[in-house]
Image (cartoon, rainbow, N blue to C red):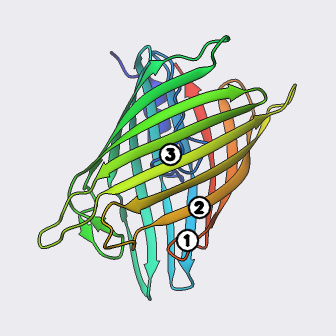
Amino acid sequence: MKIPIKLLLLLLFLVLIPGRAWAERPFQVTETAVPTEKDTYRLETGLMMNRASAEKKRTQVGVNLRYGLIQNLEFDLEMPYLFVESDGRKKNKQGDILLNTKIRFIKGRVANPLSIAGQMIIKFPTAGENDILETSGVVDVGFLAIASKTFTPVTAHINFGYFFIGNPAGQDLSDQIRYALGLELAFDETPMKLIGELYGRADTSSASDANDVLVLASGFSLQASQSLAFDTTIGYGLNSKSPDYIINIGATYSFN
């Protein structure tokens, strides 16, 4: 398969502008059960910023490329770049690369608009071990169950997954459960959708809740053309372990 010249040019351009990782636009975390169509590329780029306190800020930029290899099967490569400030220390570096595979088991139809899919996420430790970036330097593997259903004019997406967290030398990190509920509200004869999202993660070890997170987000997406869409969401932490806020701004471009 030959890679289109315009894909190479877009990749060269987009590695210089913002993106984000582990989510499907326009959501901050939620994935939908609808893979990219066969022989179609979906290029996502944006900007995600969060602040846990005045001393701890994180900005993630990069590029995310999805490709429909065959019908109902999608491959997704995420390449983030991190800017982190923590307790007076600063670090800028290429983040861990993610390779995701999504397969749809049930396709929604008019009589029963329910789609069910599964996703495998592999984190490659390209950032190495770094306490400021909060990267472990080892491989993580996650499995996500995804369901999407339309209740006109609302489409709901439910995610539930288990992530096996690799252990660096001398450490015993807990595995994680991750979950999300994403809602899209469409309007007749308008390219805009309203977005709502509730998501979180929890350690499987009952002895520790240091990584537990719960976030509520809302925003909108705008379909500028058949192939180009823009979106913005703002999230708010609902517990003391969550960031104070998360801002996610970006765009999606689809092409063959």
Q: Earlier in the sequence, mark 1 or mark 3?
A: 3
Q: Do tag 1 and tag 2 residues touch (Cβ < 8 Å)?
A: yes
Q: CA distance from mark 1 to mark 3?
A: 17 Å
Q: Residues within 10 Å of mark 1 (few under 14, many from 20)?
A: many
**Label 1, on which residue?**
243
Does 228 appear above or below 86? above
Amino acid at the residue labelled 2: Val
**Label 3, on which residue?**
23
Amino acid at the residue labelled 3: Ala
Amino acid at the residue labelled 1: Pro
**Label 2, on which residue?**
215
Please name whichever residue, 193 or 216, is drawn nearer the observer in this view of the structure. 216
Q: Residue furthest bottom?
A: 88
Q: Position of residue 135 (x, y in %)?
A: 30, 65
Q: In which quadrant of the rendered image does the N terminus lie? A: top left
Q: CA distance from mark 1 to mark 2?
A: 8 Å
- Find numbered disc 2 in the image and state the secondary structure of the residue it sits on: strand
